[in-house]
């Protein structure tokens, strides 16, 4: 049992590192809009291993922003919300892991695809909710065009969250089509 748990945590750490590497691919448009490619491996991992493992791996991804210098600092609370907290919430993608794996086992591709889309939307919404809060409370003074901080944060973080969710969903659906068992851990097959 211990070997299996260690394997799960090592897998999560490796995918968190991959997520961080993907974060260095420049897909930013301006200072407020970006597509987070790191969400792709985190979503795959959470859908393979469930929310508990997904939350821990996503937390590691958030923490990896510090030693790699990918942290934008205004205050301690803002940094805690935008990195450890927001990134951890990506792990909620895994709340549909059991349903997805059951659909795969039953050969029900329609339900499996719906679970992938649902999980990705849950994880993206949960993460970008916290970015929205930080954008509203901490970054609001930088809102463009004299826009209300809440409206500006909602628009910019909403667009980033939606774009990230769309890209992640497309990639995960392609992965599912190529090899559905990528979402089923080998130790449960």
Image (cartoon, grey):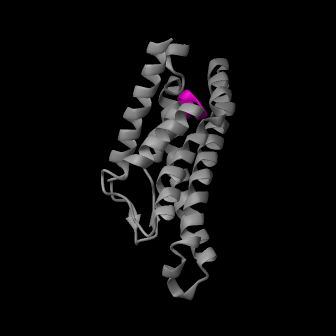
Relative to residue 151, is residue 68 drawn left or right?
left
Residue 20: x and y, percent? 36, 46
- Viewer-closest of 3 and 161: 3
Q: Where residue 77 sits: x, y (%)?
A: 51, 62
Instruction: Decide if residue 162 is in sight here.
Output: no
Farthest residue to the bottom: give it. 146
Residue shown at the point (49%, 50%) measured from the top left: 84
Determine the residue positioned at 59% across, 78% down: 149
Tell me which segment is drawn in magenta: 46-51
Residue 111 figure quarter: top right
Q: Quadrant of the C terminus?
A: top right
155 and 74: which one is in front? 74
- The residue most toward the front is 76
Where does the image place residue 118, in percent across and percent down from the top left?
66, 42
The quarter of the picture where residue 110 lies is top right
Q: Magenta stretch: residue 48 in it?
A: yes
- Residue 62 vertical placement versus 71 (above, below): above
Which residue is depicted at the point 68% across and 28% down? 99
Image spot of residue 72 (x, y percent): 39, 65
| Residue under the image location 40 percent in, 72 percent down | 30
Q: Main secondary structure of the magenta part?
A: helix
When the figure is inspected, residue 92 is found, relative to residue 151, above or below; the finding is above
Q: Nearer the viewer, residue 18 or 106?
A: 18
- Left or right, residue 42 beside residue 152: left
Count of picture labels: 0
Residue 4 as seen in the image, left or right of residue 149? left
- Residue 123 in view: yes
């Amino acid at each position: 049992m211990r070997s299996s748990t260690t394997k799960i945590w090592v897998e999560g750490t490796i995918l968190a590192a991959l997520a961080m590497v993907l974060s260095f691919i420049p897909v930013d448009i301006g200072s407020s809009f970006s597509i987070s490619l790191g969400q792709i491996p985190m979503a795959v991992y959470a859908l393979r291993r469930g929310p508990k493992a997904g939350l821990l791996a996503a937390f590691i991804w958030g923490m990896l922003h510090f030693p790699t210098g990918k942290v934008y600092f205004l205050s301690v609370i803002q940094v805690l919300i935008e990195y450890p907290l927001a990134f951890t919430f990506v792990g909620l993608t895994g709340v549909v892991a059991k349903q997805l794996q059951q659909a795969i086992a039953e050969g029900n591709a329609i339900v499996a695809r719906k679970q992938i889309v649902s999980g990705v939307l849950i994880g993206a919404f949960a993460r970008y909710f916290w970015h929205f809060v930080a954008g509203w409370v901490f970054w609001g003074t930088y809102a463009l065009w004299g826009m209300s901080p809440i409206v500006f944060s909602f628009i910019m973080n909403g667009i980033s969250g939606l774009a990230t969710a769309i890209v992640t969903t497309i990639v995960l659906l392609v992965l599912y089509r190529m090899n559905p068992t990528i979402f089923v851990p080998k130790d449960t097959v």
